[in-house]
Amino acid sequence: MSDEKAVTKTKKKNAAARFFGGVVAEFKKIIWPDRDTLLREFLVVAITTVITGLIIALVDYGANYLFDFLLKLGA
């Protein structure tokens, strides 16, 4: 019985070692962007987010105005 526990424990350690070894190998494959590329991509994301937020705000304002107008007609 104790031999089975030892084998299971060893298998778990080997599985964990293989997993973390794979993680390290994948991290070595990453090509990190340089500062200029990172800044450019950040600006694109930030500007896109602001524009999308403005569009959503305009649609929300328009829908709110339309529903208020329709409610006043029905009253």
Image (cartoon, rainbow, N blue to C red):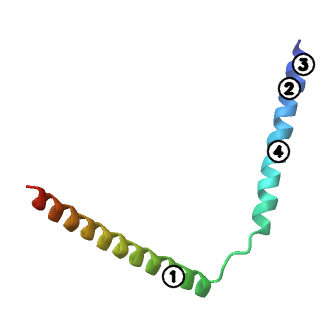
Q: Residues within 10 Å of mark 4 (few under 14, many from 20)?
A: few
Secondary structure of residue under mark 1? helix
Q: Classify mark 3: residues with Cα within 10 Å, few (<14), some (14-19) or many (20+).
A: few
Q: Secondary structure at mark 3?
A: helix
- The reply, left or right, for residue 56 in relation to residue 75 is right
Q: Nearer the viewer, residue 33 or 47?
A: 47
Residue 66, x across and y down, in percent? 22, 66
The three-letter amino acid code for the residue at tag 2 is Thr
Count the marks.
Answer: 4
Q: CA distance from mark 2 to mark 4?
A: 14 Å
- For marks 1 and 3, the one nearer the N-term is 3
Q: Quadrant of residue 67?
A: bottom left
Residue tagged by mark 1?
44
Q: Amino acid at mark 1?
A: Val
Element on which disc 2 rests: helix
* Comes first in the chain, label 2 or label 4: 2
CB under 8 Å between discs 1 and 3 = no
| Image position of 44 (left or right of 37) | left
Q: Amino acid at mark 4?
A: Ala
| Distance Cα–Cα, label 1 vs label 3 | 57 Å
Mark 4 lies on residue: 17
Kindly indicate whether the residue at mark 2 contacts the one at mark 3 (C-beta within 8 angstroms): yes
User: Could you tell me how far apart the alpha carbons at marks 2 and 1 are, in whole angstroms?
Assistant: 51 Å
Q: Residues within 10 Å of mark 1 (few under 14, many from 20)?
A: few
Q: Which mark is residue 8?
A: 2
Question: Can you say whether 12 is above or below 18 in the image?
Answer: above
Marks 2 and 1: which is nearer the front?
1
Q: Residue furthest left?
A: 75
> Image height check: is 23 above or below 55?
above
Label disc, if present, on residue 4 of the rendered structure: 3
Q: Are marks 2 and 1 in contact (CB under 8 Å)?
A: no
> Which residue occupies 82% across, 52% down?
21
